[in-house]
Amino acid sequence: MEKGKISVQTENIFPIIKKFLYSDQEVFLRELISNAVDATTKLKTLSSKGEIKTEIGDTTIEISIDEKKKTLTISDKGIGMSESEVKKYLNQVAFSSAEDFLKKYKDDANIIGHFGLGFYSAFMVADKVEVITKSYKKSAKAVKWTCKGDPQYKIEAAEKKERGTDIVLHIDDDSKEFLDNQRINALLNKYCKFLPVPIKFGTNTNSHFEGEGDDKVEIVEEEDNIINNPTPLWKKRPNNLKDKHYLDFYKELYPMSPDPMFWIHLNIDFPFNLTGILYFPKLNNSMELQKNKIQLYSNQVYVTDDVKEIVPEFLTLLHGVIDSPDIPLNVSRSYLQSDSNVRKITSYITKKVADKLNNLFKKDRESYQSKWDDIGVFVKYGMISDQKFYDKGLKFAVLKNTEDAFSTIEEYREKVAKIQTDKHDRTVFLYTNNKDEHHSYIESAKAYSYDVLVFDNIIDNHFIQNLEQKLDKVAFVRVDSDTADNLVQKDEKKESVLSEGELEKVKTIFTEALGDLQGGQIEMKPLSPDDQPVLITKPEFMRRMKEMQSFQGANLDMLPDPHSVVINTNHPLIVDKMMKMRNKDKKSDFASYLHMLAKLNQNMLKGKELADFTKKSIEFLS
């Protein structure tokens, strides 16, 4: 048996780093500035421990561009490095000084990097990198490290008076975009907006006038352009904050968005570290437009706004910030999915959101219900996709009827059970998805003392299906899916005033007049004389299937729209008018007209059919 050590040739490392270290080249700026923040944090930690006796002074990190020299420079006033530290940390790939420092000061320092690869991201955009550094130690001398993206490097003495590190990137021809001020400014806003150390990028010019009259002069002053907010709201104590602070911070995150309805301040340090603020935006029906608005940070370093591996799908409808050092900066999606801390974070956030909604509901139910059109999308989405949230949501999910009255699910079941329980002992929840289009159906249902709910949201088909599966002995029936007398199926039977022979004649007239109903059928029913003469009903199962497929993006324009045509055999227009007509063509025209009237009532008349109906109406009037 033979044992050995695999040899990795450094000649092959740099091409891999250049192309594959990160999926997006622009991340190099985040990594290098994070290193600068680490160097500054280390300095502050040593100072707080009394290991640095003098004042550390200004610690601002500066980013500068020299278009002539084609360089981008990141300068910090942090801990710096000695020559031996340069050799140790820069010449060994994946040997991280952050790891060393954490071992020594793990309870005091807040260090971002753990992998030791961040520095090498510089070679994704630069064909030469220079590091000019000077340690904070009194006896230390400045050194310069130079590398051209191959295993060869050079270390030499350098001229640098102040402690800290300058990383000078000589940008290669393929990456000239990173010499553009606007591009760098956008990246700094994206990745560094809330880093804990001030970051300067250029200067701002401010002017004001002093003196009066002829002595009035314009004073022009330049001040540093600090691009970040080192103490963001989520890092502050909730007891010290007011509503205005949260609303102002929301505007900082989403300048063009309307104010949110309410928010949750997250703050936990066991069994994991997590802070953040989650806002409930006004959703209405625009679910997709609202996604990817939660920003994930690690120690105030921006990581991503694609957080679906970290929070449940329905929570992506929220806006805001989550910050946790327990989520590593650069890990694969599969690692995130299997990481125990991530699973704990997911459960914690879900619980906090459910508790917040429940508290709002109990504290001020009227205010909660007034926001239901916005909250409802989120609550329903959560109940569909997360069983634990469903269990909690039963307490604060509300149903709204056509009179704008609200009830919890259990309250509603008790409210309608007496009248709306069918022959199978199921409580029937009647509903409409369009109050205006279904007006006549709703009125017919009310004539039977039935109550009708409103489910007009994009997600309601799925929500209804979910409730039917989980609630015991509850059925949802759309108000246009059957005649009013049969929406809640009973064992009662009604008689028609027409004889069997007359009924057969009426059915024949309509069958010949209407032709192919594309999967639908003609039904004869002895309804109340006050009901419509002809009604159209859409089978609940088939209609739901079609609507669910439509929700998933299927193009259903070419599919038939099956519906049943119900003839009210007790209506005067059928019993008296049609039965007394002698001309067969007139009977056929009349049947066709009543059918079109029923289709008009369901908003099913379009194009040529609508034009023919208008023409026929004018003829009848004439």
Image (spheres, helix red, strand yellow):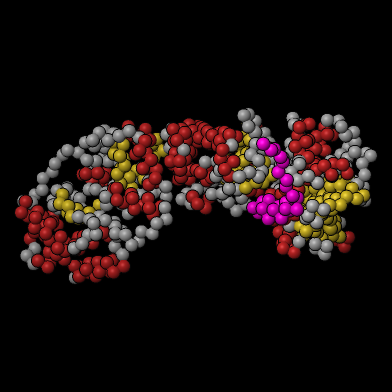
The mark tally for this picture is 0
From what the image shows, is residue 208 above or below residue 252? below
Residue 21 percent coordinates (x, y): 68, 51
Chain part drawn in magenta: 1-24
From what the image shows, is residue 78 above or below residue 517? above
Instruction: Give the position of the C terminus as an image quadrant.
Output: bottom left
Whether the magenta-drawn stretch holds residue 620 is answered as no
Instruction: Give the position of the N terminus as an image quadrant.
Output: top right
Q: Nearer the viewer, residue 501 or 98?
A: 98
Whether the magenta-drawn stretch holds residue 11 is answered as yes
**Residue drawn 76% across the image and 39% down it:** 98
Q: Is residue 179 left or right of residue 405?
A: right
Residue 33 percent coordinates (x, y): 75, 48
Q: Quadrant of residue 321?
A: top right
Q: Is residue 371 visible?
A: no
Which residue extends farthest front?
1
Q: Is residue 583 left or right of residue 523?
A: left
Residue 129 percent coordinates (x, y): 81, 54
Q: Nearer the viewer, residue 364 or 277?
A: 277
**Residue drawn 50% across the image and 35% down it:** 354
Q: Is residue 609 left or right of residue 45?
A: left
Q: Nearer the viewer, residue 41 or 613?
A: 41
**Residue drawn 55% across the image and 44% down it:** 308
Q: Quadrant of residue 66?
A: bottom right
**Residue drawn 81% across the image and 46% down it:** 91
